[in-house]
Image (spheres, rainbow, N blue to C red):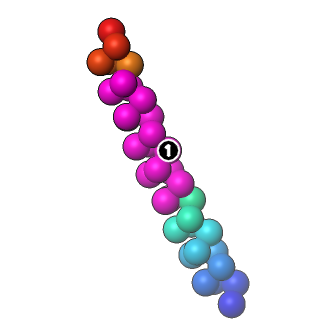
Amino acid sequence: MAGDKIVFQIFKEQLLAIKYAKNIKSQQHLDNTFL
């Protein structure tokens, strides 16, 4: 089922993007506390 695979791939990429965005946010937060 190629459709399921594509959906799963998109889902996985979105999860990674969210995790990445959260990491950037917390990193900025850390930078702000050290300034």
Asked whether residue 16 is drawn in magenta, I would say yes
The percent position of residue 35, horizontal first and vertical second, equals: 33, 9
Judged by its main secondary structure, the magenta piece is: helix
Q: Quadrant of residue 31?
A: top left
Q: Which residue is disc 1 drawn over?
A: 20
Query: In the rendered structure, which amino acid carries the disc numbered 1?
Result: Tyr
Residue drawn at x 50%, y 59% is 14
- Quick check: 35 above or below 28? above
Residue drawn at x 70%, y 84% is 2
Q: Quadrant of the N terminus?
A: bottom right
Residue drawn at x 58%, y 74% is 8
- Quick check: 35 above or below 4? above
Give the residue at the far bottom of this rendering. 1
Tag 1 secondary structure: helix
Foreground residue among 28 and 4: 28
The percent position of residue 28, horizontal first and vertical second, equals: 38, 26
Give the residue at the far left of this rendering. 33
Residue drawn at x 61%, y 84% is 4
Which span of residues is magenta-colored? 14-30
